[in-house]
Amino acid sequence: LGELSKLAGAPVSRIVRLEALAERVTREGVTATSFAPAFEAALVAETATAVGLKSIIAYRFGLDFDPTPPSVEEVERQVGTWLRTIEKTGATRLVDPVLLRHVLWTGARTGLPIQIHSGYGDTDLDLHRADPLLMTGFLRATENVCPILLLHNYPFHRNAGYLAQMFRHVYLDVGLAVSYSGAQSGQVIAESLELAPFTKVLFSSDAWGAPELHLLGSWLFRRGMARVIGGWVASGDWAPADAERMIRLIPAENA
């Protein structure tokens, strides 16, 4: 992290992946009754040097999950089943909906922002179950608990914009969509701004692996934003000062 910060000339911080941390905790050795306190302790240790959390419950189950936190008894019962499965297969992949809810709620109670992947992903994901509207109940339940960042969202970016308008703790980005839609990325950006408050929209590149992807994600987003906002200024709908404020907010100040 220190090396990346030096190269970038900017602060670099960590995001903790909830499901990955839960899987690590099981590999370190737990029982049905000790998993929950062990996971919470590990989360406290990890978040001491992190600025947020991430969940991929959309991949592992879907966003149509029960929005309530599970009971202690439910968690212990499902951990027992999970541990028996690990013993048979050696695979620690967390897919149980009860335990996915448990780690998500444990993360929420830290008060840190949680990124929740929504929309376009890969073949592990059932796209129709990755619409953020499906988790409206969870958003109601977390309104005074922690910020929720809806990550990527395509083709549900309009739905995400609606949720960001309705719930004061909900934010969104369209980073992955911008990278994959290329020449049409300006349209995706414009659609994401139809309802979302301009103070609730964030930039992301969704870059990983090749460093060129960070540059490409930034370039496509800046170009798309300039074309969309420039069009509003040219048509007389916005003043140049409005455009300048938006360009300060979304790529930097909102984060």
Image (cartoon, rainbow, N blue to C red):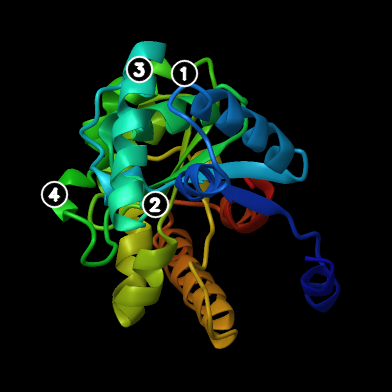
Q: Do the residues labelled 3 and 2 touch (CB within 8 Å)?
A: no
* CA distance for labels 3 and 2: 20 Å
Q: Name the residue under label 3.
A: 70
For disc 2, the neighbor class at 10 Å (few under 14, some 14 to 19, many from 20) is some
* CA distance for labels 2 and 4: 26 Å
Q: Which of marks 3 and 4 is nearer the N terminus?
A: 3
Image x and y of residue 96, in percent: 28, 37
Q: Mark 4 points at which residue?
A: 128
Judging from the image, what secondary structure is the residue with disc 4 in?
Answer: helix
Image x and y of residue 234, in percent: 44, 65
Q: Mark 2 points at which residue?
A: 92
Foreground label between 3 and 1:
3
Task: Let me know if residue 108 appears in the view.
Answer: no
Viewer-nearest residue: 91 or 187: 91
Q: In this view, does 41 lie above or below 62?
A: above
Hey, what amino acid is under mark 2?
Thr
* CA distance for labels 3 and 1: 18 Å
Hey, what amino acid is under mark 4?
His
Viewer-nearest residue: 251 or 63: 63
For disc 3, the neighbor class at 10 Å (few under 14, some 14 to 19, many from 20) is some
* CA distance for labels 3 and 4: 25 Å
Foreground label between 2 and 1:
2
3 sits left or right of 23 in the view: right
Hey, what amino acid is under mark 1?
Glu
Q: Name the residue under label 1.
A: 143
Foreground label between 3 and 4:
3
* CA distance for labels 2 and 1: 32 Å
For disc 4, the neighbor class at 10 Å (few under 14, some 14 to 19, many from 20) is few
Q: Which of marks 1 and 4 is nearer the N terminus?
A: 4
